[in-house]
Image (tube, rainbow, N blue to C red):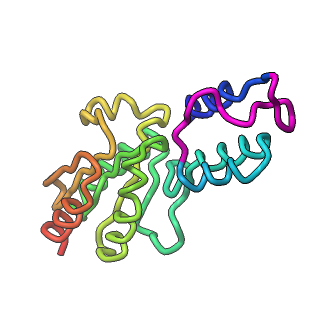
Amino acid sequence: MRRCAALLRRSWTSSGRTGAGGLSPRPQFPLPLPGHADAACRAVAPKAAAAAAFAALSLPRTFSSASSPSPGSSKMHLIKSEEQFDGVLAKIRDESSPAILYFTAAWCGPCRLMSPAIEALNEKYPHVTTYKIDIDQEGIQDKLMELRIDSVPRLHFFSKGQKVDEIVGADIESLEHTMDRLYK
């Protein structure tokens, strides 16, 4: 996203034929923008067009690592330290309760795609506890290497204290099938 914004900024240059604010009315090279952003650029002054283009490039973050669980999803717990991570792993193994370790990152688009499905399945299976681990947190890299977490999204499914399945990637259909098979 930063690269796109930098390209957009560089593409608006001063020239002999200027619009409002000393910027040329069109970029020097075509920049692919969503359809509504292109129409907005044609309809407003060039300075405002640049602002509209930047607004069109920004995407909402639906389920970032910085967010806390929503009030309805009490079974989603954010792991914030290595000690807490170790405690969760011990709890899963000792109590033999059904659980999911959800490895994610704030910058991960596929993770944001999967998050609403995970939240919905949390409501469908209230007896399953989901632990969300942001791989970019400080202090947990050793534990991630030990568990061989090298890509996100990744989900580890536990039942009766043992890891019984794993999903790598944003496969919502596989997630639903696995949850139905293991926790119904």
Screen quadrant of the N terminus: top right
Confirm whether the magenta stretch covers residue 18: yes
Residue drawn at (35%, 28%) of the image: 142
Which residue is painted at 19% across and 50% down in the image? 166
| x, y percent for residue 115 | 40, 59
Give the magenta-colored segment's residue range.
Answer: 16-33
Residue in the foreground of this view, choosing between 48 and 119: 48
Question: Which residue is the extreme one toward the right?
Answer: 21
* Image spot of residue 100 (x, y percent): 29, 57
- For the C terminus, give its image quadrant: bottom left
Query: For the point 29% across and 33% down, which residue is it?
Result: 150
Q: Which of the 4 image quarters holds residue 30?
A: top right
Q: Residue at x 67, y 24 (%)?
A: 10
Tally the marks: 0
Q: Report the side of 49 relative to 144 (left or right).
A: right
173 in magenta = no
Q: Main secondary structure of the magenta part?
A: loop
Left or right of 41 in this view: 71? left
In this rendering, position of residue 28 left or right of residue 132: right
Above or below: residue 65 compared with residue 115: above
